[in-house]
């Protein structure tokens, strides 16, 4: 019996102004069980994301009308599209381009030129992160001080205020809570959140954690940096230093 695939009819919006690349990606994704739609510019991408509600967006950075960064910003700012995971495509290999995308809320990035195997591995990893890990109603909820994480609904609350996190941020925060105060190295933390087949720089991990703290607001003390090691969850704001 074949194991279920991360594809399984998932709808992917491919956004790129290079027609040949879109056709190549579309062909390979369709062959592997994905459904696809495509847009060639930023404004069309926004309209399609809003109307079609894809399971994943593969988004090029350099495009006419609106660039990929601005498209991602607008999608993450709208409640109806904020939780759609985004993989950014960039022709630039500088770390700064990766950091900009992650700060906006992208879940991963792939540098052009890329192989389809790499892109599909990243897609499968991001889609798996969206699955529910908990096995029962009780296990689906995690609590720590003022923080409540609902795995089943993919929702986070601080003192009953809902906190909007990206898929990767949600997984990172849940991993810290599940660790119960134990220190997680950056590598271990990202393995739990993104899988062992995805390479992410330490700088990118720190960007995700900074974003989580900002969104937690007055409860940012929950996530504590252990210098030279990684991160852990704190039990009390009195321990914050």
Image (spheres, rainbow, N blue to C red):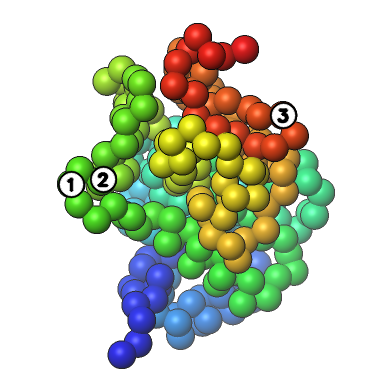
x then y, percent, for residue 76:
46, 38
Q: Give the side of residue 37 with respect to residue 152, left or right.
A: right
Tell me the distance, in whole angstroms, between the alpha carbons under discs 2 and 1: 5 Å
Residue ID at (73%, 64%): 112
| Residue 97, image x, y percentages | 74, 45
Q: Which of marks 2 and 3 is nearer the N terminus?
A: 2
Where's the N terminus, which quadrant?
bottom left
Q: Which of marks 1 and 3 is in front?
A: 3
* Element marked by disc 1: loop
Give residue 137's mark: 1
Badge 1 vs badge 3, beta-carbon distance below 8 Å = no
Query: In the rendered view, would you say 128 is above or below 229?
Result: below
| Residue that numbered label 3 is attached to | 227
**Residue marked by disc 2:** 140
Does residue 227 show up? Answer: yes
Do the numbered discs 2 and 1 sit on residues whose CB atoms are within 8 Å?
yes
Q: Residue 203: horizontal and vertical position, in percent?
A: 73, 40
Q: Can residue 47 be seen in this view?
A: no
**Residue placed at 39% from the left, 80% from the top?**
33
In terms of secondary structure, where does tag 3 sit?
Answer: loop
Q: What element carries label 2?
A: loop
Q: Position of residue 28 (x, y in %)?
A: 53, 81
């Amino acid at each position: 019996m074949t194991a279920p695939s991360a594809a399984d009819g998932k709808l992917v919006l491919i956004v790129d102004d290079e027609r040949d690349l879109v056709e190549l990606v579309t062909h390979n994704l369709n062959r592997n069980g994905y459904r696809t739609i495509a847009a060639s510019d930023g404004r069309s991408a926004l309209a399609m994301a809003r109307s079609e509600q894809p399971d994943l967006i593969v988004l090029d950075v350099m495009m006419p009308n609106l660039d990929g960064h601005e498209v991602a910003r607008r999608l993450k700012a709208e409640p109806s599209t904020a939780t759609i995971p985004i993989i950014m495509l960039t022709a630039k290999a500088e770390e700064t381009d990766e950091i900009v995308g992650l700060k906006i809320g992208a879940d991963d990035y792939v540098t052009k030129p890329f192989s389809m195997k790499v892109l599909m591995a990243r897609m499968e990893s991001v889609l798996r992160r969206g699955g529910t890990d908990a096995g029962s109603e009780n296990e689906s909820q995690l609590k720590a001080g003022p923080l409540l994480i609902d795995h089943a609904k993919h929702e986070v609350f601080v003192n009953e205020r809902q906190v909007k996190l990206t898929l990767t941020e949600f997984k990172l925060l849940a991993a810290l809570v599940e660790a119960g105060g134990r220190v997680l190295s950056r590598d271990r933390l990202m393995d739990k959140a993104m899988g062992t087949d995805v390479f992410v720089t330490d700088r990118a991990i720190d960007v995700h954690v900074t974003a989580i703290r900002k969104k937690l607001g007055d409860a940012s003390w929950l996530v504590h940096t252990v210098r030279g090691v990684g991160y852990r969850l704190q039990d009390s704001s009195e321990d914050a230093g």
